Image (cartoon, rainbow, N blue to C red):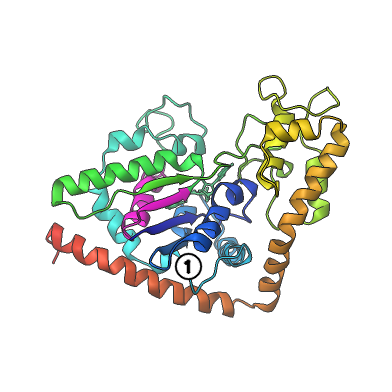
Amino acid sequence: DHVIFSGIQPTGIPHLGNYLGALQQWVKLQETSPATTKLIYSIVDLHAITVPQDPQQLKRWKREAFATLLAIGLNPDRSILFFQSSVPAHSELMWILSTTASMGYLSRMTQWKSKLSLPEDTSPLDGGSKSKLKLGLFSYPVLQAADILVHRATHVPVGEDQSQHLEFSRECVTNFNHAYGPHLVAPKTILSPAKRVMSLQDPHLKMSKSHSDPRSRILITDSPEQIHSKIMSALTDSTNSVSYDPENRPAVSNLLQLLSHFDPQGRSPEELGVVYANLNLRNFKTTLAETISSQLSPIRKRYEEVMAEDDGAYIDHVQRKGAAKARESAEATMAIVREAVGLY
Ligand code: TYM
């Protein structure tokens, strides 16, 4: 039977990249999977602290992240929703995996380099950068592997930026199973059609929470006014018409891709380029802003309802129930792992 696992960091309200690349798939899987499929989605607070966080803000962000999962349509009676730190087995398995994980493989991974703004060819042990690199950021992928493997996940729906981490998770399975026998399950990556959503301000950069310009991303709880203003200020080019030409018109093509992801008729960016060929950029942007707003508005409404009615108690209650189920799921694997390793 299938087990779906995925995670998101509580580092601010999710943006369209998170939503189209991952969260929307989580909901689709909930709606289309047979009852025998286990669905497990975690807010990965232990990953969030691999870069400095303000503790009070982290608490708020965790609650907001939980509310967004409910707002997009995840049903806590069907999908297991929980904070990673509520299930200590994630950390325990991480330690065990780290004893068979390769330093060399980890040092080639790109995410910690990008977080430190280091060039691709830097090694973690290189002189000047050494002092800045924290062990937790370096071993981030081992914790991510533990998240997945502790639940024996068969499928992991993520955006393309997580592909390397999932490759590493499979490597962890190979290393562990080689040492201790065939106990862990290698997960498959599920990529959505919107596997890499690009910034509104630079079509060559992925949309990201950490980019300094808030106009580069639309948050899933943005108001129609905020969406309108961000789309209106999105980068275009000097040709005041619409056409899909990623090579010569990357910025306008990026907007057509975004429209395509939200198009109720599922038309491709090429088709939409033809449909809107006669609009000027201003009118095209208005159409795009309205399309996005109308699809995000139910999410925004539910988010505001959850946050308004809740002083924290409801989310806390739902989270505890999810964490109890997640602990049960993780314990089944840990019993096998501890036995295999000789811990008891
Ligand atoms: P995070 O919190 O950065 O992002 C959550 C999900 O959003 C996807 N995503 C995107 N997809 C398309 N286009 C974009 N511009 C874009 N930006 C973000 C991410 O690929 C991700 O699926 N390391 C993970 C969290 C994690 C995890 C796990 C995921 C921890 N343990 C186990 C899967 C399984 C992360 O930082 O995601």
Q: Residue at x 24, y 64 (%)?
A: 334
Is 232 situated left or right of 134 in this image? right
Report if residue 141 lies within the magenta region: yes
How many marks the image carries: the answer is 1
**Corner quadrant of residue 286:** top right
Observer able to see residue 132: no
Observer able to see residue 261: yes
Q: Secondary structure at mark 1?
A: loop
Indicate the amino acid at tag 1: Ser
Q: Residue at x 14, y 59 (%)?
A: 340
Q: Is residue 273 above or below residue 163?
A: above
The percent coordinates of residue 180 (x first, y second) are 14, 51
Is 311 situated left or right of 129 in this image? right
The percent coordinates of residue 257 (x first, y second) are 67, 37
Report if residue 130 lies within the magenta region: no
Q: Which residues are magenta?
A: 134-157
Q: Residue at x 54, y 62 (%)?
A: 55
Q: Which residue is mark 1?
A: 79
Is 320 situated left or right of 135 in this image? right
The percent coordinates of residue 344 (x first, y second) are 13, 67
* Circle 1 Cα neighbour tier, 10 Å, few/some/many (<14 / 14–19 / ≥20): many
Q: Residue at x 23, y 43 (%)?
A: 174
